[in-house]
Image (cartoon, rainbow, N blue to C red):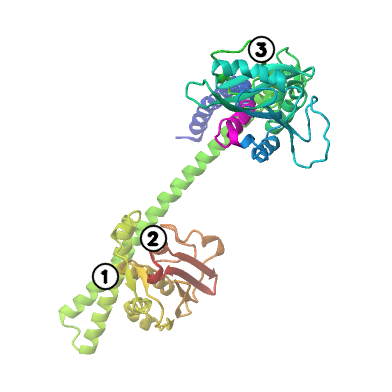
Amino acid sequence: MTRLERATRGRSFAVPMALGICISVALLSWFGFRAIGEWQRSTRLLVEQRTQDTADLLATALARDMRAVQDSVLLPARWNDAMLDAPFDITPMLASAFARYPYPESFFGWRGAPTAASLIFFNRADRPPPWRSPAREPNRFPVRVSADSPVAGAIGARLLRDVAKGADFSVFEIGLQHVTYQVVTRLLYADPFHERPLGGLGFTVNLPWVHEHYFEELTRQVGGIGTRDGLTLSILDDAGGRAVGSSPAGSRGPITRRPFPLLFVDPHVVMLARPPDLPPHVWAVEVQGIGGDPTLSATSGYAARTLLVAAVSAAVLALGLALTSRAARASARLAEMRSEFVSTVTHELKTPLATIRAAGDSVASGRVSSPATQREYARLVVQESKRLARLVDNLLAYARVTDVTEAYRFEPLPLCELVDETLHGFAAQLDAKGFEVEVSVPPDLPPLNADRTAMQMLLDNIVDNAVRYSGDARWLAVRASGRNGRVFVAVSDRGVGIPAHELEHVVRRFFRGRRAGSGGSGLGLAIASRIISAHGGRLEIESVVGEGTTVRLTLPAARTAA
């Protein structure tokens, strides 16, 4: 193919690619507009959901708090008619109720029938009712006891009507000293047919005070007043006025209202037979999203963002092309590494085989007659066979490198024994090359918790690398120590070293450094790293180019292994 034909073919390929990129950008822009529209809609739904959740939370908190005195004071059996006798054992319980719940202004109780003479009132000391007579003596206790209240007759007369009906609760509104009160009372009887009254306990709620103070304090505790998190909370009375909060200025967001009865008792108590003197006051919780809601503000300017999306899309396309090119180069590099690996392994297999065959031919032909020479040839055959076996073991380990732990058999192994076996296997090679070997393995080291075959392969690969890349400095050192249930092994040489930028790559399969020279399969350190990891240990490599390399192993001792 001529250069003109290649150029023409390249241009004909570029036109469809450019057209495809333009169509892709257009589609991405259209999807961007659609996505932003859906985002705005989902954002508004999210704000609506937030207002609904907040309204439900506040309404639930109000309902729970408004019936809390009934649940914690009137219903439990912690009081009875005997507690209404002087010195009034009921006062500590009522003092605790005053401290926990702000809306009861007074508690009252009696024994027998509710009359003006039998009713005893327990008033707040810090917020006395307007009809209470002035205190004659100072008293720091939060409860003031009164047995001659001017409102006892009106309350007792109303209670007698419910006692005559045999009701369990008496709930009504009544005007006392020109102030409207809601009265909640628990009635007790001495017989199961409710014919003989035993007594009762109740409380009064000052409704004007509730309108002015109670809901504001509780709403502030639950959700906060004002523009918190883009929401405003309000309490609307039965006339539609705002008892708490104010209408937010500016654009309006979604509004959620939850009605609730102004009833300081469980609504089920009066659901079946509501007394005529208990008006159905229906208030409401209102939660509104305001114009400054951060979630809604984040959706503005979607047109500009769409253009940004289109630009980013083009950049992503270019990045995708670049990554594709990089992936293709990486794939080619991997293929080259595998090809080099196959070539190297083939050479590594042929070399010991050729040596073994040559030695065997020499012995078989009778050219080697002296016993010393025969022993030398035999040692050479053993050395090369071990070299061949080590390479085959590495290849087998590589073939099952993702599943090697299934073949492990963990047992206590003395490190000194493993080191001796490893160095004995390299003895002929070390002697032939004139290596100076230093071994410092204390005999009292705790044994390793490891698989013998895997440990032997680990040490063989590390020592083989140290011998193979030792260069002109023929020196090898193996040192070990133990501490805190771990065994530390260091194998050092004074060879060619590994560049710093290659240290993180040498434990990868097929990787061989630029200074590695000929020989080696690129699997030794990869398999060593996999073995040490499977044993719960750690492998670290320290190396300086031209000065040597130290491989440090950290392994668990047998006494601490799981």
User: Between marks 3 and 1, how big is the CA–CA gap?
Assistant: 115 Å
138 in the magenta segment:
no
Neighbours of disc 3 within 10 Å: few (<14), some (14-19), many (20+): few
Give the image location of residue 497, x and y in percent.
Answer: 51, 70
Please tell me which residue is depicted at 61% across the width and 12% down the height of the picture: 275
534 or 310, which is in the foreground? 534
Residue 534 tag number: 2
Inspect the image, locate mark 1, and give the three-letter code of the amino acid beneath it. Ala
Q: Where is residue 271 in the image (x, y as percent from the top left)?
A: 55, 15
Q: Is residue 286 visible?
A: no
Q: Magenta stretch containing residue 65, yes or no?
A: yes
Q: Which amino acid does label 3 sit on?
A: Asp
Residue that appears at 83% across and 40% down: 138
Residue that lies at the very extreme toward the top in this rendered image: 276
Left-right relation of 205 to 339: right
Which secondary structure class fits the magenta region best?
A: helix
Numbered disc 3: secondary structure: loop
| Rendered image: mark on residue 128 | none
The residue wearing badge 1 is 354
Which of the image's four quarters has the C terminus?
bottom left
In this rendering, position of residue 112 left or right of residue 420: right
Of the numbered discs 3 and 1, the one sitting upstream in the chain is: 3
According to the image, label 3 marks what residue? Answer: 277
Specify which label sits upstream in the sequence, 2 or 1.
Answer: 1
- Report, in whole angstroms, how far the alpha carbon at label 2 lies from the one at label 1: 36 Å
Magenta span of residues: 62-82
In the visual, does 331 lie left or right of 53? left
